[in-house]
Amino acid sequence: MKKYLVTGCAGFIGSTLTDRLLSEGASVIGIDIFRDYYDVSIKRHNTASALKNPSFTLIEKDLSADLEFLSEFIDRSDELVIYHLAAQAGVRKSWGTDFRIYTRDNIDATQNLLEWAHSRGGVKNFVYASSSSIYGIPVDLPMTEDHTVPAPHSPYGVTKLAAENLVRLYTANMGLPSASLRFFTVYGPRQRPDMAFNRFIRAASDGKPIGVFGNGKQTRDFTYIDDIVNGLRLAENSIRGLAMNLGGGNRVTLLHAIETLSNVMGRKIEIEFSESKLGDVPDTWASAELALTEMGWKPSVSLEEGLSREITWLMS
Ligand SMILES: NC(=O)c1ccc[n+]([C@@H]2O[C@H](COP(=O)([O-])OP(=O)(O)OC[C@H]3O[C@@H](n4cnc5c(N)ncnc54)[C@H](O)[C@@H]3O)[C@@H](O)[C@H]2O)c1
């Protein structure tokens, strides 16, 4: 039987992927330890509809610990696709003593899962959720996989790059099929509450000024969640160990994004500027050519449309 293992299945992207797989009739095993980086009740809510589906099994375990328990849920004969999305997210928290949380959940947990996948065998693909933050501050834009030298600008980025390199090593040395997808600022329904659009929409709807770190001229290549999930699904068949950008083609300044938000919400938004934070990068912009040629991936949701869907979700 074919099974999908989704790690981080209670999070923003993992829960949306899980719902998509279940809607396709797949059998899904989800793992999440429900870390309290943000309100755990949001994660409970994210998994609520999947839990009503008999094809879904939720395992509340830590991926950085012994993974023997997985053999209870996955038979040796099962064909397995692993979507590894579990991680400690967030650039700003990754400085200082909290770094050890990042090494545990982003590096140790990934190595542990890779080792389990390799020793089990029968893995059709290991798809890893990497990040644009592995690039740091690039000399040239857009960022391309073969020309932009990875030089993370935050401890978070260092751990995401380390894990991506571990995936590459298991493919090169052990023949584990894999794909790494470098997501660029993902937004839409279920977006994490610490992320900019989620914070902005809540503040604006309460009539409060929104807080912007820096002068607002920094650019981001915003990528809508459904485009990311489409990329994850296409990556199931990309088994050559490539690392590919998934960037939404919506590269704008933060000020432009706020203006779009103001138009979509039909209200004036006041901005409160403060110093930019350690680890923030001035620009991100993906070349998505490789994902197009390798998997036929193309983002399709405009910033206006995606923001309007995120607003509808948050307001409900
Ligand atoms: N959201 C974005 O814009 C973005 C951009 C680039 C990359 N990514 C990557 O995509 C993935 C998903 O991000 P997200 O925004 O959905 O984050 P999220 O925090 O909503 O989800 C991650 C989930 O992983 C779980 N988790 C963490 N450590 C674990 C462990 N040791 N064992 C089991 N579960 C564990 C957490 O409880 C959480 O529910 C992450 O790998 C992140 O680095 C996200």
Image (spheres, grey):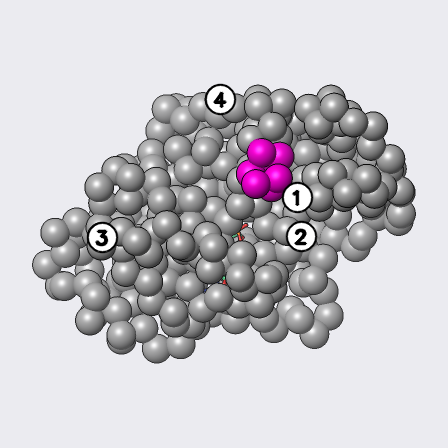
Callout 4–callout 2 Cβ contact below 8 Å: no
Q: Amino acid at mark 1?
A: Asn
Residue of label 3: 55
Q: Amino acid at mark 4?
A: Ser
**Label 3 to label 4: alpha-carbon separation:** 29 Å
Residue of label 1: 198
Q: Is residue 139 visible?
A: no
Callout 2–callout 1 Cβ contact below 8 Å: yes
The mark closer to the camera, 3 or 4, is 3
Residue 21, horizontal then vertical, whole percent: 30, 43
**Label 2 to label 1: alpha-carbon separation:** 7 Å
Residue 180, horizontal then vertical, whole percent: 43, 45
Earlier-in-chain disc, 4 versus 2 = 2
Dot 2, crowdedness within 10 Å: few (<14), some or many (≥20)? few
Identify the element where label 2 is drawn. Answer: loop
Residue of label 2: 194
Q: Quadrant of residue 185?
A: top right
